[in-house]
Structures are given as structure tokens and as C-alpha cells.
Amino acid sequence: MSEALNSGSAGKTMTLRIRRGGPGETPRYDTFEVPYQDGTSVLDAVMWIHGHVDPSLAIRYSCVNANACKECMLLVDGKVEYACTARLKAGTMTLDPLDNKELIRDLVTDIVPPKERLRNILAERG
Amino acid sequence: MSHLATDVLVVGAGGAGMYAAIAAARNGAEALLVDKSMISRGGATIMAQMTVAAAVGHQEPDHWTHHLADTIEAGRGLCHEELSAILCREAAERIHEMDRWKVGWARKGGRMTQVMAPGHKVPRCVYVDFLNTGPAVAKCLRTQVAQGSGITRVGGLSIIAVIVRDGQAVGAVGLDVETGEPVTIEAKAVVLAAGGLTKLYRRNSASINMGGDGYALALEAGAELIDMEFVQFFPIGHLAPRLVGMDPIMWDPFRYKLGGRLLNGDMQEFIHRYGASDSGKYTAMRDVTSYAIIKEGEAGRASPHGGAWLSFQHIPERELRAAFGPVIDRLLKNGIDLLKEPVEVAPIAHYHMGGVRVDAEMKTRIAGLYSGGEAVGGANGANRLSGNAITEAFVFGERAGRFAGLYAQNRRQAWDARAAAPVLDRMRAVAARETQGRKWTDSPTGRMLAELQTVMWDQVGLLRTGAKLEAGLARIRAMRAELDRLPFPAETPFNLALLDWHDLRASLLVAESVAVAAIARTESRGAHQREDHEEMDPAQTYNQTVELAGGALRLGKAPVVRYPFQLENAVAAE
């Protein structure tokens, strides 16, 4: 994670609107003021929110900014992007879960291959 | 209660875990491969952008005994040499097997290309493509896992405890990441392949899963850990300008392939002042380079962000592009122009030499409990050679799966729900403390993880003193007590905060085991540098073990396992 973000020494702030809730719920957007510096990624910001402001915010990621795990795909201002390679910019940005995958909660969608999904395995063998 | 049964449960689906599942299955066992992330996406392997050491002798004549000699030299007298010998001897076999599985090792004229890496005396490291070796390896193993019969894979299942009955591992209890519900798993053997602990440190190259929970699983199951004081700091982790979409440890191949110059804040080379020869060769070992960068900083000669400069400006553009063409463009997208300006680098927690104590069959002292990959301690002693980590994932992963599979053959399940009851009770008690519907403005678990990372970095980090370590240990112990009172949200599904809480519980136990081992080693050796004991002490040429006894960590000493051998003639592959 960005250390400048952690230490709060980033200087600038911007606004992230993040879609919250699960499949049955009325969509709502929560707004967060996020400190950032040039080059801060959207994943940095979401991790910062989860770790400093709202631990109930859900996102799926593994590799942390290396763009190796490919788990953090979402919509940034309506466009499909990896959270780890999309950069923050001044003003307001809006994050939504992928709209072509089953919504699990917040920014998490079901991108797990069916053969690896615990629910399916339990149904088959449990 | 959800319940699964298998012959061999493999915990962690990075390189080691996937290889373990493949090996268990081809040795007649049914394997269940689980990971808290998606299969093959979490862990360290997929992030490795570098190279894999094996004496295949394609580039220059070589022999595994030479690889062993280099590994032991790097380990500063503390390698479990039998494990090191296995690592170096079986490395070529695994590289050739991956080759048959079409991983795509880089080749020239039919021979695998092998490059030099610091600490190796010959070019020994195969790769797929700079910055893409890990993803290629992960993809190759993922395909083998998916195509092989006898392997069931489950993503999104975090293992909370290995269940032991009458001194024998009989299964595990996991947490379904999506639902937050417990899942019990009966197994004849369990392989811990859950990787290292670098997430415990503020500056790290870790994925979300490297908080050390594999070590906590081993400790709580009654197994021992070894060499926990030896955390490797990668000397030239990226520091500035901000770089995303790339692994922060990517600079090493640049450096030794092109001769990147490491400079202090005064733009002067400095490694030679710390007893290593570097200029023109760039082969100083990791522990020395990390130490030198920190010491330059303390002397007021750091780069602006507190590290050192790494400069490629003396290298002609043609040469730079020939070596790393597409990468140069990816860097430009990050606003980094290597032709115009140096970057800043600094040590970053990268790998753990310590880990689960195993024998040559990768077995712990608990029957049926095995370990593979970075989770295993011992083979690299006090300092790991560049290139040995993925090798270790392959070799130790394969062996752990193989011996676990053989052990499971003709054995009955010994699961007993009563043995799992205390863990399930604990998980229920934790879940009962979830807080419903609160408007959060703060993250208590996030704050505690950040504090732990700062404590480990400042007090149990690269340059240690007895006083700093004691202060760190006291704080870690206090945090372990505070953890039980931390509130966290109940929002489901995919309650990441519940996972955070369980991860933190494991991380604190493992952090404490690093601190107690570091306090007791009153010398400087390899990655363990004590400013109050600056010299290596030959009388401390032993390994330290850690175990849980009556809920408290207990240190022990073990004589170093030696493996007498003679250097064989280096030979070129046919």
C-alpha cells in the first residue's frame, strides 16, 4: 500500500463514490474523502477506506498493485478497469461492481470459476 | 455444518500448494486444494517476476553440488543442509517437468537461457520472460491442477485451524469467505503451503495472504517453527516515484543484466564501503546491500524519500530497449523515464527464511502434517540466494504432496468432531462480537494491522537492538490481548473484516515468534542484524526453534543439520 496514504502525508484529497450493498438491496452510493498523491491507485484508495474508515467495505483482491492476480476488476466511472492500475484523479470518481457478473456485495462479484466455488463443491459432495 | 472429506488437504494454492496437490494425486491420493483467494491467484508465486535457480547446465557447465555450495555460503552457516541438498538436487527435475508442461522457459538455440543472479557463481537462473515468470508458472501449474484427476480445488476458503487428535493431524476447520460460516474438513494428511509472513512489515512486497497464518496453523497444531528471526529484506524494492501495476521488487534483473548503479543521496557508489564488491558486477548479496542502504541513510546520505538511487542513465537507449523493451514503456506509463532519471529504491520485506520445521519428507513432528514452499524453514539458513524461492515452491511442494499422498494411502480417516469443537466454539464467539448496522468512521482491525506493521518494521525489522526488540515484543503481546475486544462489522456476504480479524490473530502470534527468536540471537548473521551485537558469534551456530507450550511460545535450540558433500565436476547438458 502507498505509505504516503498510510501516514496521511499525501497532501491532496479527492472524492470516491462507491456503490454499496448486495443483490437484493436498493443501490446506494457512499462517498469517501480520500487522500492521494500522483500515481495513487484506485486499489490503494479502496484498501485505505477498508483499513481506516469503513471495514465493512468489501472488495476482492490478492496481489496488491502488481496486476498479477487479476481479481480486482471493477467499473471506474463506468469503464471496466483493474483497481490496481487505475489511478486516482482530482475531483470525483465513481466505483461500481462489474455489471456482467453476479453481484455478491459492494464491489465484489462472482468471478470464481464454478468448479472452484465452495457452494458448488458442497452441493456436489457435502 | 458444511463438511468435506479428502485424503490430502493442501492449504494454500500458490506454486507450492499446486505442486503438492499434483504430487499427492499422482501418488494415489485424492487432494483438496484450498485457498482463501482464488486458486493460483493468491500467494507469492504469481507475483514473482524474476528467475528460478536450478543447475540444469544449459547456459554453462554446472552441477547441483555447486548450487548447494552457493546456497550454503549464502546461508551463513545455518542452512539445514539436508534440505538445501534436496532443494538443489531436485531443482533440475522440477524445471524439466515444468518444461514438459510447456511453461515456456526462455530458450536460445534449443537450450534454456540461464542468467546470473547475486550469490550464484554461474548463470543458473531460468526464466520465462522478465516480469512474467511468476504468472507463467502459476498458469502452467493451474492448468495441470485443472486437467489432473483426483484434485478438487476450492477458492474462498480460509483455514483457521488444523485439527489434531492423539498427536495426529485429522483435518481442519475453515472459514467460508463468502458466507462467513465455518466448514469442517476431514483429511488423512494436511500440507501447509500457505507461504510466508512479509505482510507483517510496513514496507513489503506481499500479497494480501502473506500474514504468516501458515506458521500459526503449524504452531497451534503442535508443530515447531525454525529460524523465525531471519526475515529477508529485498534491498532494492521500489520506493519512488509511485509505481503500480508492477512488482516492487522488479529492479534486480535490470540491475545485474544492465549494471544499474546504486548510489547514495550524494550520487556516489557505496556498497564497497560495507565489505562487498559491487561496482561493475552487481553481485553483492541481499543482506549486505540492505544493510548498506540503511547505514548510508543513517549517515545522512539517503535519497530524498529515504532510500538510495538506482541509475541506468549511463546505459545507451538501444541497450536498455534491447534488454527490457516493453517494460520500458510500462515504466513510462508510470511516469518513469529510465534514460532521464534514476529511481529511488529501499529495502522491503520480501521473504521469510524461517518457517515450519520439517524433515527430509517435509513432515512436521505431528503425524500427517506436512509443509512445502516458503512455509518451510531451514533450507536457506540466515539468508536466501536470489532464485531459490520458486525452486523451493516446486521442490518442497512436490515432496510435501508426494509424501503426504503416500502416507494417506491405505490409511483410514480419523476425524472426530469433538476434536474440532474448541475451534468451532472460538469461531462462534468471534462471530458473536460482530457489530450490526453501525456507521463506521474507523477500522479497529485495520488500525491494529497498520500498527503491527509499524512495530515490526521499526522494532523487529532490518537493524535490531535488544531494547527495540523487547519494546516490540511487549507491544505485540499487548495487542494480542486487545484483539479480543476489537469490534468489527457483520455485513455479509464477503465480510472481509471477519477474515481480517482471524488473519490478525494469526499474524500477532507469528510476529511474537519472530520477536522472541530475534531477542535470543545476540549476534549479527545474515538477515538478522543486531546493532548491539554487530559481529557474528561462532558459538551461536545453531538453529532456534519455536513451539507453543501451554499457550505460550517456547524457544529451543537445535544443532545445524550438516550434509557432507564434495563438489562434483560441472557438466554441460547434452
Image (tube, coloured by chain):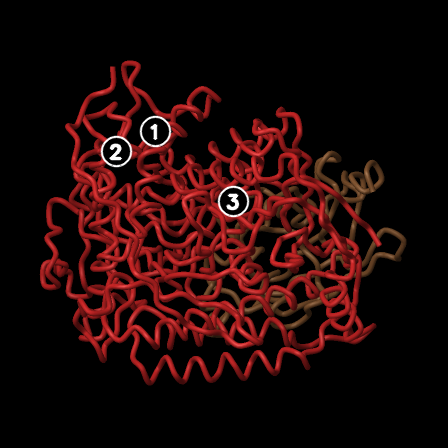
Query: Where is residue B485 shown, x and y percent of the image?
Result: 68, 82
Kindly identify which chain the residue marked by label 2 belongs to. B
Assign a secondary structure to mark 1: helix
Residue at screen point 25% across, 51% down: B341
* Mark-to-mark CA distance, 2 and 3: 34 Å
Residue at screen point 52% across, 70% down: B548
**Residue picked out by circle 1:** B92
Assign a secondary structure to mark 2: helix
Q: Residues within 10 Å of mark 1 (few under 14, many from 20)?
A: many
**B328 sits left or right of A52 in the view:** left
Kindly identify which chain the residue marked by label 3 belongs to. A
Kindly identify which chain the residue marked by label 1 belongs to. B
**Residue picked out by circle 3:** A67
Task: Tell me if residue A7 can be seen.
Answer: yes
Q: Is residue B452 above or below residue B467?
A: above
Task: Check the rendered structure and report the hue given to chain A.
Answer: brown
Please tell me which residue lies in front, A57 or B399: B399
The quadrant where residue B326 appears? top left
Q: Is residue B346 above or below residue B58?
A: below
Residue type marked 1: Ala
* Mark-to-mark CA distance, 1 and 2: 8 Å
Q: Nearer the viewer, mark 2 or mark 3?
A: 2
* Mark-to-mark CA distance, 3 and 1: 29 Å
Query: Where is residue B315 shown, x and y percent of the image?
Result: 18, 40
Numbered mark located on residue B64 in the image: 2
Assign a secondary structure to mark 3: loop
Q: Do marks 1 and 2 share a subunit?
A: yes
The quadrant where residue B273 appears? bottom left
Query: Where is residue B212 shown, x and y percent of the image?
Result: 51, 60
**A124 sits left or right of B454 in the view:** right
Q: Residues within 10 Å of mark 2 (few under 14, many from 20)?
A: many
